[in-house]
Amino acid sequence: MVSLPHPYVLHAAVSAPCLCCRKGKDQFDNLEKHTQWGIDVLEKYIKFVKERTEIELSYAKQLRNLSKKYQPKKNSKEEEEYRYTSTRAFLATLNEMNDYAGQHEVISENMTSLITGELTRYVQELKQERKSHFHDGRKAQQHIETCWKQLEASKRRFERDCKEADRAQQYFEKMDADINVTKADVEKARQQAQLRHQMAEDSKAEYSSTLQKFNSEQHEHYYTHIPNIFQKIQEMEERRIVRIGESMKTFAEVDRQVIPIIGKCLDEITKAAEAVDHKNDSQMVIEAFKSGFEPPGDIDFEDFTQPMKRTVSESSLSNSRGDGKSEPKFGSKSKGKLWPFIKKNKSPKQQKEPLSHRFNEFMTSKPKIHCFRSLKRGGAGPEDFSNLPPEQRRKKLQQKVDELNRDIQKEMDQRDALTKMKDVYIKNPQMGDATSVDHRLAELGQNIEKLRLEVQKFEGWLAEVEGQLPARTEQSRRQSGVYEAQNPSGVNSCAQDRESPDGSYTEEQSQETEMKVPATDFDDEFDDEEPLPTIGTCKALYTFEGQNEGTISVAEGEMLYVIEEDKGDGWTRIRRNEDEEGYVPTSYVEVYLDKNAKGAMTYI
């Protein structure tokens, strides 16, 4: 880009130094504009890469939000739907899309660190280097211009002294030729002429010395200083060009590095899609909704020529009881049980209804849900799931038994851990008081016993469904009768369920008695469980992330309700609203107990 001065430049330096200086200055101006343009290009590329990283981050964020939006919610119906292969494939697609978004975040991070950050630092260094080179160039330019001005001043002084000496010589010669001039005036004119000649000689010597010095400085300027400065500027500019080329190569490499991982994400999505099994999904639907009921029998021909003597066979939709025998209860496996969609039509008005109307009623009716002693809290359904078809009831009971067994195992693990801790305390009293864990061990023992009773109760219902135990004992019937006497409202609600649209009853009282579930001590304890009353308020002193089961997250400064104070274990039970309650460390909150609340005590 910059080479040694052309011979024309050397000639101009000798013949017209001022013109050469002006040309050199013009070259510096051109180079200054060009190098500034190069820095502007580099900054433009940095801005381009920065915007690309912002786009990648935004795209990754949108992909993550999209994946999160369609993720199944915990403890919801959607989570149960993801047991099918098609929905599991969709879930795998969502997870892979999350990883896919992560790769775009990697692209953004790598481009920021390897390109944007590095080039930003390099631009600052480049600006400092460019400023230094042009400062040196201007300094050299100013120096040669100063030397040129000194040469011009010396030259003008020599010229002036020569003219003065010439005029003094002419005046002396004139005075010497004039006979009227005294000898003293002639001598004075001669001395003045000699002085002027001496001054001219001195100016000549100074001009010669200054000229030699300027020529030497000018040679150094155009053959050494300026070429060196131009060479440094050239190297600086070439490094800039190389650096922007390497950055563009890195730009492509950053994308290329994540392509294999993105390919794996897409391969996993394809693999999940290929794992979709329509036969398996269909079989799961069958298992999930099969009821275990037997189809109804054939409908007999009804002879309307004898309207008052019409009878209905035992296999018809009426499914009469016959011989005054009560029908088996809803959950048993007896073949003589009622089909759940059929009502007992006893009134003559209903018996005279056309067959087509009865068939339509059969197709559109829904099974009645009878009253039970043990109802889940909140009216979700009977505790023994007797409102479900036999097969579905068996599955629900089995799930409940498995859940209770897991709870028992957890309690036993805690008990074993506390037992080991107690043994350590006994062997090493300095580590803690062995009696401090006795209360907790007793609580765990009681919890395990209650859970075992629960397991026995649900296993009994499960065995009943599977036909391993008698359907119902006489003692159970008596207990059900006692519950009816104590809870007439429950019987009335059951009676309302047995009524048909026109007000007639569809089932007999004896069957209603059989449908009752025996009351147990656990039922009474469960029914008596009410939401704990608030005994005060508290303010969160610190933020607590409740990640363990039974705990609740709180934010610093949040006000909440206290429903159970610290009982010495370092935990306080609080409530945010009707649905959110749990334990937090007592040291994390400042408690304000209500003095009028039951069981309240004052914190000092």
Image (tube, helix red, strand yellow):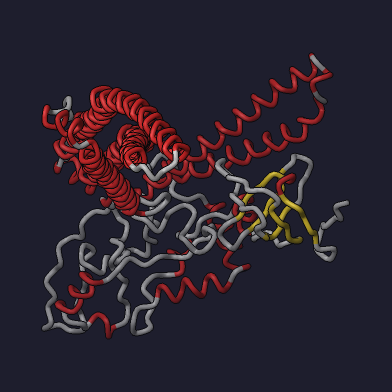
Residue, x 27% and y 28% (percent of image)? 218
Q: Is residue 342 visible?
A: yes
Residue, x 13% and y 82% (percent of image)? 304
Q: Is residue 116 visible?
A: no
User: Considering depth in this image, is 40 or 157 the residue closer to the camera?
Assistant: 157
Q: In this view, which residue lies farthest toward the front?
A: 179
Instruction: Say left or right for 123 vs 581.
Output: left
Quadrant assignment, res 421: top right
Residue, x 57% and y 33% (percent of image)? 410
User: Considering depth in this image, is 440 or 35 the residue closer to the camera?
Assistant: 35
Instruction: Say left or right for 40 vs 146.
Output: left
Q: Picture coordinates of residue 128 (x, y %)?
A: 38, 35
Quadrant assignment, res 399: top left
Instruction: Say left or right for 551 vs 306.
Output: right
Relative to 582, residue 277 above or below = above
Q: Picture coordinates of residue 193 (x, y %)?
A: 38, 35
Q: Picture coordinates of residue 182 (x, y %)?
A: 44, 41
Q: Picture coordinates of residue 544 (x, y %)?
A: 62, 46
